[in-house]
Structure formats: C-alpha cells, structure tokens
C-alpha cells in the first residue's frame, strides 16, 4: 500500500520536470523551424537527441516506480 | 478481494516469464520475441536480395526507406562513418522490428495457462516483445558501450583514454576520475533503461487502456477505438526509440572519434556538414 503510493508519487512528480523540459525543447525547435524551414535536416538529429536525454529523467522516475512496485 | 480482481484484469510482469527450460537455460517468452524479430529481418533481407531492382518496386522501396534515412544521417556524422555504419544500422533495424513485434495482435494475449503453487491462475504469453525485457536492451547497450570505449581507446591509446577520464588539471584527478567513470557507465544504464522503460510502459499503457475500455464496451461500443489510438502512438514511439538508441550510439562513437582527431570536435562538425550537403541520400532523407 505504502509502496504503491510512493510509486505513484515518484512517477507523477518525476514527470513534471521532463514534461516542462520537453515542452521547452520542442517549442524552441519549432521556433527555429519556423524561422528557417531549410534547416529541418540539420535540426532533426540534435532535436531527437535532446528530447531523448531530457526524457531519460522521466525514465529514471519510471524505473524508481517500477522498483517500488515489483521489487 | 478487489485487488486480485485488478490483477487478473491487467497482467503485468516486469521480467520475462519462462516458457520451458533446456538444462540450466530458461527459455523465456521475450526470446521468442527476439527470434521473431530476427526472423522478420532475415526474411526481409532474403526477399530484398533475391531479385533487387535498380528502380525499386513498391515493397522494395518501403523496405529501403528506413535504411536510406539512416544512412543519410550516419554518413553526415563523421568522415569515418563507414567503419560503424553497419553497427548503427543493425541496432536501428533490430530495435525497430523488436518494438513493432509487440504491437502485432495476439502478442501478449495468446498464452499458456499456468497455475502456480498458491493456486493463482495466470496466462503466460507465448510472445513478449524483446525490448520489453531488460536483458535484451542491456545486451544491445553493452554492444554500443564496448564499441564507443573501443573507439575512444583507438583514438587516444589506452593510457590516453585513462588520461581523458582523469580530466585536464591533473591535481583534480581524484575527484574527476570517479565522476567521469560514473558518467561513462551511466550511458550504459540510460541507454538500456530508456528503451526498456518506454516499451514496457507502452505495453502496460495498452493493457490498462484495454482493461478500462472492456469494462464499458457493452455500453459504448466505440470505446474499442481508445486503445487503437494508443496503438498508433506506440507505433510512433517504437520508431522514435529505435532512432534515439541508434543516434545516441552513433553520437557517442563519433564524439570518441572526433576527439582523437587534430583540430577537435568543432572543425569536424563543419566537415560533417559539408559532407552532408553533398550527399544525395542525405538530401533525400532530409527533404
């Protein structure tokens, strides 16, 4: 029961930061794309990498949640 | 007991379940998923190499599309892309197919009924997507890890690589060496955990949505479209995660190569852009 609550809190609170970070990253990328549509190819790879690294924080929260639930 | 009812509705197993054992080796359902993914890849390779056409047909161009896209990106990374292109492409295709195997109908639902010691009845799925098993993703991450450490050692030499880990002012080495070592190993953890977490969470998400909608499907028959939306989302996530894994592995390797070259990383990036602009496949991928 306690660990279920802790797991819910871990993923819920842990998703706030990456959520904001992903939003910032996407908004800047879209801004850059709007200014210079030809740069789509150059933006694409750093964009995906940046999103992946931001998202990793959320994944760490998920791992903690899974540990609390199953281990 | 409401808790047990919930458990029977959504079956979540964080580790792959054993189907049967061969001596000391447990044959798990994620191995079936991995073999299925390999089979699909081998079949695709056999089909495409049977009678390749210069002007590709519809199926051939569909099979060539992801490879063309990835080669465009890989050939733009460093000047030595030929030495690791096969590894990155292999990682990308294997993860892509392994992710998408999990979305086939019947995967995770068709299984063997198993009764454990406590008398609980549970269905063990015959196929589990390979990337929803940490062993698979950790194995791929170890391959990528070995490759980028190999390239780092090759670029700097063994002693030079250790020096790189110690950092620039040598008196800071006792502090910087453990930090750099941990950051090196955290790549391994984050690579494997990212793929596992995303695909496993996707499986759980679809199972949860199915369980929620089966409860009201007799009232609202259209509720079956709700899990379908999430299936579409998982199709996209499977592609993105395969791309992310391959691109991160590529970036780690190309940074290790670029650091070893005279002139550093910055000039190499300029060269890479020049190569990128001149490459027809890269232009096609970016268009």
Image (cartoon, coloured by chain):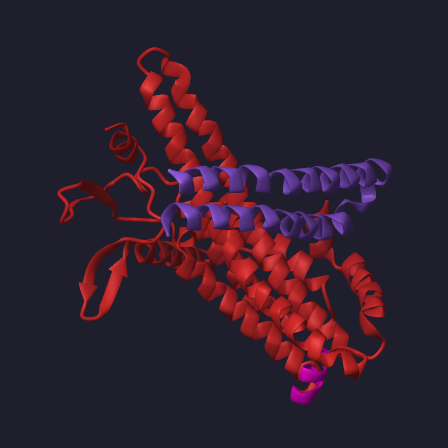
Chain colours: A purple, B red
Residue B4: horizontal and vertical position, in percent?
Answer: 25, 33
Q: Which residue lies furthest to the front in this view?
A: A2
Q: Look at the picture and state if B198 lies above or below A5.
A: below
Residue at 61% over, 76% down: B149
Range of residues picked out in magenta: B158-166
Q: In this view, does B271 lie to the left or right of B25?
A: right
Number of numbered discs: 0
Residue B163 included in the magenta stretch of the image = yes
Residue B52 can be seen, yes or no: no
**Position of B96 compared to B253: left or right?**
left
Seen in the picture, residue B272 relative to A60 is either above or below; the reply is below
Residue A48 position, x and y percent, is: 67, 49
In this view, the residue in front, A33 or B45, is A33
User: Which quarter of the rendering shows the N terminus of chain B?
Assistant: top left
Residue B126 seen: yes
In the picture, the quarter occupied by the C terminus of chain B is top right
- Residue B4 lies left or right of residue B135; in this view the side is left
Q: In this view, does B49 lie above or below B161?
A: above
Quarter of the view holding residue B215: top left
| Residue B104 occupies quadrant | top left
Residue at the top extreme?
A: B219
The foreground one among B98 and B207 is B207
Query: Can you say whether B284 is above or below B213 in the image?
Result: below
User: Residue B89 appears at what percent x and percent y?
Assistant: 56, 61
Q: Which residue is drawn at 65% across and 66% down?
A: B252
Q: In the figure, residue B209 lies in which quadrant? A: top left
Q: Is the magenta stretch mostly helix, strand or loop?
A: helix
Point out residue B28 in the picture as x, y percentages from the top left corner.
28, 57
Tell me the residue at 13%/49% (across/down). B117
């Amino acid at each position: 029961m306690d660990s279920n609550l802790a797991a819910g809190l871990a993923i819920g609170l842990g998703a706030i930061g990456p959520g904001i970070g992903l939003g910032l990253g996407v908004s800047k990328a879209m801004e850059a794309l709007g200014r210079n549509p030809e740069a789509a190819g150059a933006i694409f790879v750093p964009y995906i990498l940046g999103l992946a690294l931001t998202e990793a924080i959320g994944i760490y929260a998920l791992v903690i949640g899974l540990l609390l639930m199953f281990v | 007991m409401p808790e047990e009812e919930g458990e029977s509705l959504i079956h979540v197993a964080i580790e792959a379940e054993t189907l049967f054992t061969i001596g000391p080796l447990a044959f798990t359902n994620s191995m079936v998923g991995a073999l299925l993914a390999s089979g699909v890849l081998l079949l695709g390779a056999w089909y495409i190499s049977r009678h390749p056409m210069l002007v590709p047909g519809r199926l051939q161009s569909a099979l060539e599309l992801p490879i063309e896209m990835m080669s465009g990106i890989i050939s733009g990374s460093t000047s030595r892309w030929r030495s690791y292109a096969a590894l990155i492409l292999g990682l990308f295709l294997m993860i892509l197919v392994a992710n998408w195997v999990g979305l086939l109908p019947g995967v995770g639902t068709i299984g063997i009924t198993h009764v454990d010691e406590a008398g609980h009845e549970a269905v063990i799925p015959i196929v589990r997507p390979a990337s929803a098993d940490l062993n698979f993703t950790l194995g791929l991450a170890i391959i990528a890890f070995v490759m980028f450490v190999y390239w780092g050692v090759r670029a700097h030499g063994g002693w030079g690589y250790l020096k790189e880990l110690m950092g620039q002012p040598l008196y800071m080495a006792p502090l910087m060496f453990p930090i750099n070592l941990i950051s090196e190993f955290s790549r391994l953890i984050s690579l494997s955990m990212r793929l596992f977490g995303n695909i496993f969470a996707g499986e759980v998400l679809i199972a949860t949505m199915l369980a929620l909608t089966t409860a009201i499907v007799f009232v609202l028959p259209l509720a079956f479209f709700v899990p379908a939306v999430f299936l579409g989302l998982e199709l996209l996530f499977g592609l993105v995660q395969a791309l992310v894994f391959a691109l991160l592995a590529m970036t780690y390797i190309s940074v290790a190569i670029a650091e070893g070259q005279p002139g550093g990383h910055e000039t190499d990036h300029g060269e890479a852009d020049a190569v990128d602009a001149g490459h027809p496949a890269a232009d096609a991928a970016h268009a």
